[in-house]
Amino acid sequence: MRQIITVLIVLLSSSFLWAEEVVKWNYSSQEREEGVVELIFKGKIDNDWYIYSSKRIENGPMATSFEVEKSSAFETVAPLNDYTKALEKHDPAFGLDIKYFLNEAQFVYTIKRKESGPFTVKGELQFQSCSGDECLINFVDVDIAIPPLTKKEGAEALAATQGNKSQPLEPMGATEQGVEAGQSSVAEQGADKERATDKGMLGFLLVAIVAGLGGVFTPCVFPMIPMTVGFFLGSGENRGSAITKGLIFGLSVTLIYTAVGVIVALFQSTEATDIMGSHWIPNLLFAILFIIFAISFFGAFEITLPSGLANKADAKADKGGYIAAFFVAFAMVIVSFSCTGPFVGSILAAAVTGGLAIKPILGMAFFGMAFSAPFVLFSLFPSLMKKLPKSGGWLNSVKVVFAFVLLGFSIKFLSSVDLYFGWGVISRAFAVSVWIVLSILLGLYLLGKLRTRNDSPVESVGVFPLFLAIASFTFAIYLLPGLFGAPLNSLSGLLPPPDSSTALFVGQASTGAEQSDSGITTGLCGEAPYATEKNRVPYSLPSYYTIEDAIECAKEQNKPILLSFKAVTCSVCKVMESTVWSDPQVLNLLGNEVVLATLYVDDRSELPLEEQFTSALNGKVVNTLGKKLREYQLTRFNTSSQPFYVLIDHSENVLGTPIGSCSVEEYINFLKSGVEQFHL
């Protein structure tokens, strides 16, 4: 009975995996001119997932492509191209700027008729879908019916679209054929999708809130709290009026800052945000902006808006009434600009490089709410004013601390400029060195050992500054190994990608792996077929690239086999190797306790004729190593996810529970339990 239940569970779970799809595709065709037909591929992408552009990048992720079956009815004019603008970001896993699509992707493939009658275009759409935890290599069968040539429709379509090719076009001359990825091809398995590519929105809004609250504790704003709240309270006779004025003030400040975000958003689009995230001009402007504000915060000069604006706002505020609360808010925003400007600039800089046109609006809205919140709170509970610390020299210290932070972030934007031109001036070692120096100087400043001209003498160090100094020195020590190649994974999004400016990370296992003259890692027992520079295993780990070769060596070594399913184009796989495999204990287990089989499911190496076979999944000929490995992973483990790790014995029995993207501790437990089970 137990066996029957187990079989049913396996079948049900397998059915679920096969039914799970990540991208739903619709296909259509449209005539541009007589004889020329565009095939439109429109994919609806699940939340938390993304797919890559059709633009191929050397040593980058797998580009989306369409392999068409030859036909006498048409000829190819142009291969698959992006039909809509792709997003762009720097991927630290590849060390490259990559293009990708969220939510929806559209591609176009252009053919030319050889026949005027109807015909069918068949082929295979190939793409890679990724989330924060896994990647899938996808092959989807495509079957598009092309209607007979209609000259009138072709001419109208051409006239309607000339000069506007960048816009998505509605299908013409054909009915959309909906095909779900996984229905006409192999199964696509989706595991727990906890992180999305654009999940930085929550973090971005939290930063906006912290920036808004930080702006309150500056010399331009903090001393104005009692005066502003006093305006709300008036004579104290009408408590309701004070609360109303406070709420109007808070709403007004929020709307004013939101308006700034709206203005920025109006002059951009999601396409513009992508350009601003990678182009050298906006990155250079933000770097200069941060440096200028940092110098101002150090006390060299003060940045202010025209005084006439503040005077006019003050005049309106003096007239009293509820409308005056708005002008008090307006005056506050203007007068405090010299202190809040860097915060606003930081939020806008993060917003316009974040890939979403709405981010400046949301960022400024949350900034305004956080900035005005203390004023509203004190208008509701005036007694809390007595607990406020008095203004003093500590406010200037807040400005100086922010100046150090701004200088640190300016390196990130300068690095983007350097990467754009490929100069190599802002190397990883340079950026880390600057951060170390800034952290040490900040620690000395917090301890009173370093002063600016606007600072008051420090007779003693408070508890809070002392803890901040400890944190600053600790951060400097944390950065120090980065000069010698430590990955510093938690800061990978802010630092330049690893380069030759730092030494190789010393946390590599001593495995005795042989290296050929070309630097290609071989297996524990000798030569590893299919080894190339492209699929070289990190940390000089010995590896094989087929299951059969790994099993043969494992028998000789009396060790279990670790099947590591991955792809050259899998960013999550690279992250796993840089964050988990780099751990010394993991490296020791990989190098000494198992025989590693690195299985690239996108390996295009041609199989010998005697090893080629017909797929049991789609009936096609499996003629490459990658297709063979992918077929094995799907039929044996009901998943096509990468990375995917399985420990097996010499008879291919699974040891323990397979695992995907995980933490160091989870991976160590996975390896240890499998090795122990093998030796029982």
Image: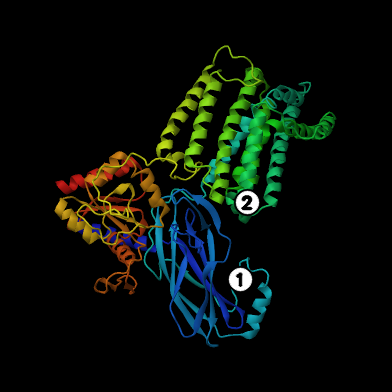
Where residue 352 appears, x then y in whole percent?
A: 62, 47
Q: Residues within 10 Å of mark 2 (few under 14, many from 20)?
A: many
Q: SS for tag 2?
A: loop
Residue at 53%, 62% in the rendered image: 105
Where residue 47 appears, x then y in whole percent?
A: 49, 55
Amino acid, disc 1: Glu
Residue at 23%, 46% in the rendered image: 512
Amino acid, disc 2: Ala
Query: How many angstroms separate mark 1 from mark 2 (CA)?
Result: 24 Å
The residue labelled by disc 1 is 170
Left or right: 509 as drawn, with respect to 174: left
- Give the image quarter of residue 644: bottom left
Count the marks.
2
Where residue 658 appears, x then y in whole percent?
A: 29, 51
Where residue 392 appears, x then y in whole percent?
A: 66, 18
Mark number, residue 331: none
The residue labelled by disc 2 is 357
- Front position in the image: 47 or 627: 627
Q: Is residue 130 above or below residue 592?
A: below
Q: Is residue 362 at least partly visible in the picture?
A: no
The residue positioned farthest toward the front in the image shown: 517
- Front position in the image: 344 or 170: 344
Q: Residues within 10 Å of mark 1 (few under 14, many from 20)?
A: few
The residue positioned farthest toward the top in the image shown: 459
Q: SS for tag 1?
A: loop
For the residues carrying marks 1 and 2, which lies nearer the camera in this image?
2
Q: Is residue 354 above or below residue 6?
A: above
The quarter of the rendered structure image containing the N terminus is: bottom left
Residue at 19%, 44% in the rendered image: 676
- Front position in the image: 443 or 384: 443
Asked whether disc 1 touches disc 2, contact meaning CB atoms under 8 Å apart, the reply is no
Q: Is residue 243 at least partly visible in the picture?
A: yes
